[in-house]
Image (cartoon, coloured by chain):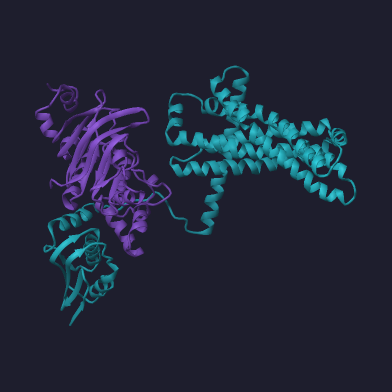
């Protein structure tokens, strides 16, 4: 992990129209981090992710990704940044009319110069990397929810992104699948050096994979805490963070 | 024997029974097809070992992993040993990760083997659909009986919303299209009638045409595309979101809750919209007659009213009523039998429109024959 910032948010306000979810947020994500955006329901975690991925313009402030200001960047610059990042949505968001291999081949066909044979083989490799070897010709409707997430991750990794965003990766998964996905995220981070940004409120995932985090608070609409989640658990800066990280003070 | 392919990033060297793959510099966006043929040939030529070596390897991406992965895959079948210890640890980890899970996926899909099997499957499938449709129509009639005996659980607010959607909100489009159809009918008829000096009969042509069938057909097509498809999409999306399952597990009748308000709204609105279409079509005809063919206004309406026949008008309204049934049934059935992904909603929507139009034409044919037989 280096200290070079790959994402830098300055004076960021997130919301919709007049409705502000979060104001004046300042934080940075370093290259190689597994960065967790956590907080209770409705605090703006997913909206923050939409801002980072360029799907939602911030109400105020700036977001720099790999040195490019996403607020003032041209559409072409934003597209370039988006190509260098992958996203895994809650449900996997696979295209239902395409096979798993076709889902992964789509970005490769659009943005790489590989030959069709290599693209096909790369799709097979990406599926193998997420434990879905041989599932190339399956349709999303033919696989389970956990497999859909893995396939979604394979698609997110298609273009060897520098950053991979995860929106609630553990949602809807059984504990074993959830644990396996966490291991996979760590392995990708370790082996490929990919920066990982995870939006979640799953405590087990937060402590297993996160090495840096911010805690968003719905009431004050600010970042209430930041740092390694395990350090925050040891020294919670306030009651809200303590309660969140200990399931409302469970086991006090 | 020593062969060598020189490439900036990857070099493949055959030394006796060993194939050496040297990766160097930046292996980024490297298309493995460049060296793949050579690796395949070497494997076929009784190579006993493949050794990956790296020399000043600066940067790499998935293309390097793919090269190693595919090489190991091809070597496994030929029992060739592959050595990757000289590659960076991350590369080795990723390759191991790709081979970590090696279960054979089982597909539920079974491929059709022969034409006979295909025909058999399709026939059985058709029989299942016929059964299903008959069951659905039966359920709908039971739902209607429940409604008439005040035992339906249909929410009034749903009926009002459906009525608003297929009534007032459809007025503009129905008016515009019907006016234009009347206009076209008059224009096409006028060109022919003018040659006999009988252009005044344009009024009769348009009045009979619109009132008897054209008004109802046009409203039917508009409503199949506008409302029937919306029913299929809405109910189909509810299927995707498991809302239909929720209804069923709560013990609520899907027919009463979803189909009845839509069906009742359409069978009430369609005859009214058909009347509107008749009037607008006649106005469209009058527009051509009076403004383009210079027919006297009073004369045009005199002929129009003379041609107006209550039987024709009622047959048109009856068509509208039947079309309301067909559109609602096709839309709701397509929605209720929709699959569980986004793609299926599109398929259900298309199916609802196509089925509604086909059945409207079939029913029109049946009604026409019956009317002919009973002299209406």
Residue B95 makes an appearance in the image: yes
Q: Quadrant of the C terminus of chain A?
A: top left
- Residue A27 is situated, as x and y percent measured from the top left of the image, at 19, 37
Q: Residue at x 25, y 40 (%)?
A: A177
- Residue A166 is situated, as x and y percent measured from the top left of the image, at 27, 41
Q: Which chain is purple?
A: A
Q: Residue at x 61, y 38 (%)?
A: B224
- The answer to which quarter of the image holds residue B260 is top right
Write down the colour of chain B: cyan
- With respect to residue A52, does B40 lie above or below? below
- Residue B183 is situated, as x and y percent measured from the top left of the image, at 75, 42
Which of B66 and A46 lies nearest the eye of the viewer? Answer: A46
Left or right: residue B110 compared with residue A241? right
Residue A153 makes an appearance in the image: no
Residue located farthest toward the right when viewing the structure as drawn = B197
- Residue B80 is situated, as x and y percent measured from the top left of the image, at 19, 68
């Amino acid at each position: 992990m280096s200290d070079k910032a790959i994402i830098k948010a300055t004076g960021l306000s997130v919301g919709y129209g007049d409705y502000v979810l979060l104001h004046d947020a300042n934080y940075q994500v370093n290259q190689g981090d597994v960065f967790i955006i956590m907080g209770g329901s409705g605090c703006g975690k997913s909206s923050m992710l939409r801002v980072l991925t360029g799907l939602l313009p911030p109400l105020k402030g700036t977001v720099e990704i790999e040195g490019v200001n996403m607020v003032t960047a041209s559409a072409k610059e934003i597209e370039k940044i988006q190509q260098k990042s992958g996203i895994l949505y809650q449900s996997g968001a696979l295209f239902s009319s395409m096979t798993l291999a076709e889902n992964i081949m789509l970005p490769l066909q659009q943005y790489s110069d590989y030959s069709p044979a290599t693209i096909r083989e790369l799709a097979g490799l990406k599926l193998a990397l997420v434990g879905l070897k041989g599932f190339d010709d399956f349709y999303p409707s033919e696989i389970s929810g956990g497999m859909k997430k893995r396939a979604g991750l394979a698609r997110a990794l298609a273009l060897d992104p520098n950053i991979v965003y995860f929106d609630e990766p553990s949602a809807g998964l059984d504990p074993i699948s959830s644990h396996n996905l966490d291991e996979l995220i760590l392995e990708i981070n370790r082996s490929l050096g990919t920066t990982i940004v995870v939006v979640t409120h799953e405590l087990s995932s937060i402590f297993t994979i996160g090495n840096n985090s911010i805690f968003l608070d719905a009431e004050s609409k600010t970042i209430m805490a930041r740092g390694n989640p395990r350090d925050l658990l040891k020294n919670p800066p306030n009651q809200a963070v303590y309660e969140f990280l200990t399931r409302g003070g469970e086991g006090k | 024997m020593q062969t060598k392919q020189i490439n900036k990033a990857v070099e493949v060297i055959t030394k006796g029974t060993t194939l050496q793959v040297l990766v160097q510099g930046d292996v980024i966006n490297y298309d493995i097809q460049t060296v793949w043929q050579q690796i395949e040939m070497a494997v076929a030529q009784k190579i006993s070992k493949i050794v990956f070596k790296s020399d000043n390897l600066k940067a790499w991406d998935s293309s390097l992993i793919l090269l190693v992965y595919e090489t190991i895959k091809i070597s496994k079948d030929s029992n060739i040993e592959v050595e990757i210890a000289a590659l960076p640890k991350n590369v080795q980890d990723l390759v191991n990760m790709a081979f970590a899970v090696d279960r054979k996926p089982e597909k539920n899909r079974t491929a059709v083997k022969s034409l006979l099997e295909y025909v058999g499957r399709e026939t059985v499938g058709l029989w299942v659909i016929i059964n299903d449709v008959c069951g659905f129509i039966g359920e709908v009639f039971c739902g209607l009986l429940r409604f008439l005996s005040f035992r339906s659980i249909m929410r009034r607010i749903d009926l009002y919303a459906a009525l608003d959607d297929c009534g007032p909100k459809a007025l503009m489009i129905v008016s515009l299209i019907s006016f234009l159809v009347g206009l076209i009918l008059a224009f096409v008829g006028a060109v022919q009638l003018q040659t006999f000096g009988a252009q005044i009969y344009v009024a009769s042509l348009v009045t009979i045409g619109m009132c008897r069938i054209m008004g109802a057909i046009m409203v039917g097509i508009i409503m199949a595309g506008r409302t029937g498809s919306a029913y299929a999409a809405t109910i189909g999306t509810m299927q995707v979101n498991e809302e239909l399952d929720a209804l069923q597990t709560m013990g609520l009748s899907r027919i009463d809750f979803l189909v009845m308000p839509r069906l009742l709204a359409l069978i009430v609105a369609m005859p009214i919209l058909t009347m509107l279409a008749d009037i607008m079509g006649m106005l469209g005809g009058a527009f051509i007659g009076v403004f383009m063919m210079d027919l006297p206004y009073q004369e045009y309406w005199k002929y129009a009213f003379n041609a107006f026949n209550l039987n024709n008008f009622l047959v048109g309204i009856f068509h509208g009523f039947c079309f309301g049934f067909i559109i609602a049934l096709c839309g709701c059935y397509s929605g209720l039998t929709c699959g569980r992904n986004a793609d299926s909603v599109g398929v259900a929507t298309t199916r609802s429109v196509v089925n509604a139009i086909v059945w409207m034409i079939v029913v029109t044919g049946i009604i026409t024959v019956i009317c002919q037989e009973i002299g209406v």
